[in-house]
Amino acid sequence: MTLVRLIANLGYGSRKDVMAMFREGRITDDAGDVLYADDKVAHAAIRVDGAPLDPPSGLLLMLHKPTGVTCSTRDPGQLVYDLLPPRFRRRTPLLSTVGRLDRDTSGLLLMTDDGALLHRIVSPKAGLRKVYEATLSTDLRGDEAAIFASGTLMLESETTPLAPAQLEILAPRQARLTLTEGRYHQVRRMFAAVHNHVITLRRTRIGGLSLHDLPAGQWRLLGPADVDALFQQPREPESA
């Protein structure tokens, strides 16, 4: 792949834009020497305006999505892409969210341009645990954990019962819920099924990855060790 096509595919601009960047001397190697469009150089050695070139295809990142932000490319209001460098939205292949968090849910969101990795993460065969912390409108009754763990709970308008889920009571109106599925608005609908209402909801963990100290609205690139950690989730659900 030519340098022009490589850099354009990473979202830095059209091929015409990238050619102009070469002419302006904005693309250099790690020693500061100006590169030309037909040069052959390792990806890791390329610099754009002095900054390392973004990772190639296969990018995976973790984002702490705030409430009020939508997992979409077109919806009105603030989008998850607005929290990333603008060029990330123009990458080819497209950088997509791995599943979704609704507008009113915050927390851990993964994004990738690797379709095979995306499908591997969301596949039911992976069985990745997703951990959510919820604040509720009324006190928990005490029987919710048994209901959620039963494997018989049926959500409204569905014909297949939910897989067993683990509920940990943190306070009378606070709970941690661990799921292995990802149905539409599942956590909110589960609590609605036991006559409660979710006030706030945050996802803190996917598989072996957790938010740790990543502030709301911030993101970080994930490497091979993080991918390994993602699929090497704890044998038992744990606090994030």
Image (cartoon, rainbow, N blue to C red):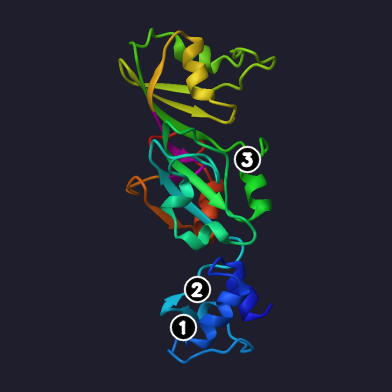
Q: Residue at x 57, y 67 (%)?
A: 10
Lateral position of residue 98 relative to residue 123, left or right: left
- Near mark 2 (Cα within 10 A), the count class, few <14, some 14-19 or many ≥20, is some
Q: Position of residue 158 (x, y in %)?
A: 66, 16
Amino acid type, residue under disc 3 in the picture: Val
Return the mark for residue 122: 3
Residue contact between numbered discs 1 and 2, judged by CB atoms under 8 Å: no
Q: Position of residue 237 (x, y in %)?
A: 46, 33
Q: Give the mark nearer the N terminus: 2 vs 3.
A: 2
Q: CA distance from mark 3 to mark 1?
A: 39 Å
The overriding secondary structure of the stretch rendered in magenta is strand
Label 3 vs label 1, nearer the camera? 1
Amino acid type, residue under disc 2 in the picture: Leu
Mark 1 lies on residue? 26
| Element at label 2 | loop
Amino acid type, residue under disc 1 in the picture: Arg
